[in-house]
Image (cartoon, grey):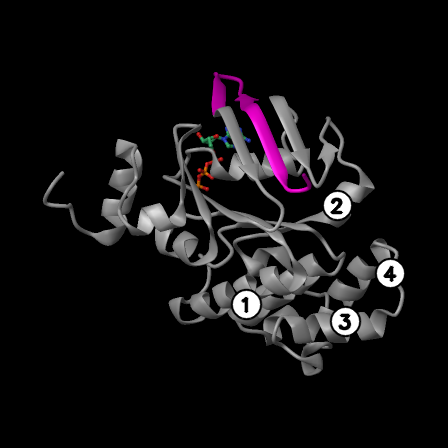
């Protein structure tokens, strides 16, 4: 299995005052080629799971396996090629003084690729920008275009897995759907596996096959998106999330 397996994952933060148990006993499988959405209210532990996967949190227990590799304290070079992350805010994730060319060529060189020109041109085409954007700087791009560059950078190492942390929530509503559609197309074309954090059930419904609902650090329900669409969540908190997103309460509840 070369997707993602989490077994009884606990993540905690020791602060001077107290210990915060951010993720509690979470088990989750994302099969290769599948797209799973993690939803839940602010502070429920969604981003902490992505950060634990990428090795950004030292204090965890349980087991994590990604792209066929059991994860320890350190992440291997292989891991950073196979697993890439797309962040919420393309303004913060691109260096303001690095052109699109620099961003992509540095990533490609770091991962040992040659034929840099051809690869940059293909990456820009893949994300719907085209070669004319190659020598632009972030301030010469719209928010949606910047996020396309960030996605091109994530695709550059030819990863198997993308970890997506609210990839459209910083964008204008008008461009959110374009970026979501791009991510849907790229998953098919590049046979990618997605684990995506989102506040927005509509976004997860569009992008994902499975949805994992988090509350206070725990996964309280994992269901196929089709069940969510048919308003069939079993856990009361999942129903609450769904009802708030739909803006109504079912008469038979
Ligand atoms: N570095 C840290 N030190 C201490 N506590 C932390 C740290 N990072 C996160 N937390 C706490 O861990 C819990 C989970 O946070 P996390 O960011 O994973 O939630 P989230 O579900 O992604 O929220 P949001 O949707 O607002 O991003 C929160 O209580 C948060 O305050």
Residue 17 magenta-drawn? yes
Cβ atoms at labels 2 and 4 below 8 Å apart: no
Residue at 15%, 46% in the rendered image: 249
Residue at 26%, 39% in the rendered image: 239
Where does label 2 land, which residue? 80
Please identify the quarter of the rendering in which residue 39 is found.
Answer: top left
- Dot 3, crowdedness within 10 Å: few (<14), some or many (≥20)? many
Task: List x then y, in percent, for residue 198.
Answer: 44, 48
N-terminal of the pair, mark 2 or mark 4, is: 2
Question: For numbered disc 4, what is the local secondary structure?
Answer: loop
- The image's mark for residue 120 is 3
Task: List x then y, in percent, for residue 150.
Answer: 63, 61
Nearer to the camera, 172 or 10 = 10
Point out the stretch of residues depicted in magenta: 1-22
Disc 1 to disc 4, C-alpha distance: 24 Å
- The image's mark for residue 113 is 4
- Dot 2, crowdedness within 10 Å: few (<14), some or many (≥20)? some
Task: List x then y, in percent, for residue 104.
Answer: 75, 65
N-terminal of the pair, mark 1 or mark 4, is: 4
N-terminal of the pair, mark 1 or mark 3, is: 3
Residue at 73%, 77% in the rendered image: 135
Where does label 1 land, which residue? 182
Residue at 65%, 35% in the rendered image: 56
- The image's mark for residue 192 is none
Residue 58 magenta-drawn? no
Query: Could you tell me which quadrant the N terminus lies in?
Result: top right
Disc 4 to disc 3, C-alpha distance: 11 Å
Disc 2 to disc 1, C-alpha distance: 22 Å
């Amino acid at each position: 299995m070369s997707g993602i397996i989490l077994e009884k994952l606990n993540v905690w933060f020791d602060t001077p005052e107290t210990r915060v148990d951010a993720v509690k006993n979470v088990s989750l499988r994302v099969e290769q080629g599948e797209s799973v959405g993690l939803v839940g209210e602010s502070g429920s532990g969604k981003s902490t799971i992505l950060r634990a996967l990428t090795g950004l949190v030292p204090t965890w227990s349980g087991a994590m396996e990604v792209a066929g590799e059991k994860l320890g304290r350190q992440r291997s070079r292989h891991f950073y090629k196979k697993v890439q992350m797309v962040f919420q805010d393309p303004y913060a994730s691109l260096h303001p003084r690095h052109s699109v060319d620099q961003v992509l060529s540095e990533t490609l060189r770091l991962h040992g690729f040659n034929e840099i020109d051809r690869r940059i041109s293909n990456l820009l085409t893949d994300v719907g920008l085209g070669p004319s954007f190659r020598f632009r700087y972030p301030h010469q791009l719209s928010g949606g275009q910047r996020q396309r560059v960030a996605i091109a950078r994530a695709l550059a190492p030819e990863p198997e897995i993308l970890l997506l942390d609210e990839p459209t929530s910083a964008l204008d509503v008008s461009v959110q759907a374009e970026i979501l559609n791009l991510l849907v197309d790229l998953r098919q074309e590049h046979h990618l596996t997605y684990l995506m954090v989102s506040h927005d059930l509509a976004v997860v419904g569009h992008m994902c096959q499975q949805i994992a609902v988090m509350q206070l650090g725990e996964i309280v329900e994992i269901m196929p998106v089709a069940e969510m669409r048919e308003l069939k969540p079993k856990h009361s908190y999942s129903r609450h999330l769904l009802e708030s997103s739909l803006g109504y309460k079912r008469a038979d509840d």
